[in-house]
Image: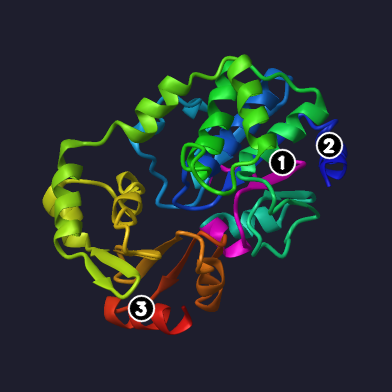
Amino acid sequence: MIELARAALADVDRLAVVCHLHPDGDAIGSALGLAASARLAGVTSVVSFSEPFVLSPIYDYLPLDLLVPPAEFPRNAPVVVSVDAASPDRLGTLLPVVEEAAMLVVIDHHISNAGFGTVDVIDPGAAASAEIVYKLIKALGWPVDETVANALLTGVVTDTGRFQYANTTPATLRIAAELVEAGASPDLIGQNMYERVPFGFLRLEADVLGRIELDGTVVWSVLFQDDLRRRNVGMEDTDSLIDTVRLAWEAGVAVLIKEIEDGTFKVSLRSRGVSDVGSVASAFGGGGHHNAAGFSHPGPPGVIIEGIKDRL
């Protein structure tokens, strides 16, 4: 798989990289890491993702100069690379542009990804898409400097839960070590990703925890748009909330339901290992992994929770 992707990218002079909407650390880190490495190799590169085109300030240490708004994503790039998107719909408004590409390389590690590219590099055994991107960069012989290394290690760190999740393998740790040797700074990544929130987030977290429920082995809560407005916090700054909800030791499964601006809901699920939340999310049209997954739903929250419990 890597060899096919290497062949597709070996002689390009322009590269367009896209990741899924509402990007997490693996999505944006993998995309920017690939584009930054390509730039060092002399390839003109840009990165984008679908609206809402906004990132949390915690990502300010990444090479954000490579980002362009969706409207500026090139329609004539010889190759488009999709990173960390488990299905085409995860590309949002950029999907029609991506579908126009003569060559689409899909790089992903979600087991639910059936493949939608000209070349599919899908490895569910990889802890993060950043692992696959790193292997591709090495196969291409492209440079890995401090900027590239920080971006890729961001992806590895976030999708392994700081190397605490069961998907952390010896190969994952070896890749992380190589990235640190190349100049990645674990302290820079750790401080930005896990020790930096706006003050309003602390009160927002209190709002969410104030309505938390434990139903058997399922712990769950809801984040509403009113919470965001009242605390002056953007949705892009709320990714870590699920990690707080899942702390209860009674819980085998944690669920955080977030109200989106259009009144629908984005649902994040986490499992301690017994339950396969990836299959639960797939039943609702979403996807992910055994221990971490998500889906969208029209709501309301009570209906969502009952549906999740039924499938568990």
Tag 2–tag 1 contact (CB < 8 Å): no
* In front of the other: 129 or 160: 160
- In this rendering, position of residue 276 left or right of residue 7: left
Q: What residue sits right under mark 1 in the picture?
A: 77
Q: Nearer the viewer, residue 26 or 89?
A: 26
Residue at 36 percent across and 32 percent down: it is 58
Residue 86 coordinates in the image, percent (x, y): 61, 59
Q: Residue at x 75, y 42 (%)?
A: 79
1 vs 3, front mark: 3
Query: Mark on residue 142?
Result: none
Q: Is residue 82 visible?
A: yes
Element carrying mark 3: helix
Give the residue displayed 44% in from the left and 52% down from the top: 51
As drawn, 257 above or below 193: below
At 22% across and 46% down in the image, what residue appears? 233
The answer to whether any part of residue 45 appears in the image is: no
Residue of label 3: 304
Find out whether residue 129 is within the magenta segment.
Answer: no
Residue extent of the magenta highlight = 71-92
Q: Amino acid at mark 1?
A: Ala
- Could you tell me if the residues under marks 3 and 2 are in contact, i.e. CB atoms within 8 Å? no
- How crowded pointer 1 is (Cα within 10 Å; few <14, some 14-19, many 20+) is rated as many
Element type at mark 1 = loop
Q: Position of residue 71 (x, y in %)?
A: 51, 47
Left or right of 183, for residue 259: left
Q: Nearer the viewer, residue 139 or 180?
A: 180
Q: Position of residue 186 (x, y in %)?
A: 47, 23
Which residue position is annotated with label 2?
6
The span from disc 2 to disc 1 (Cα, nearest Å) is: 17 Å
Of mark 2 and mark 1, the one earlier in the sequence is 2
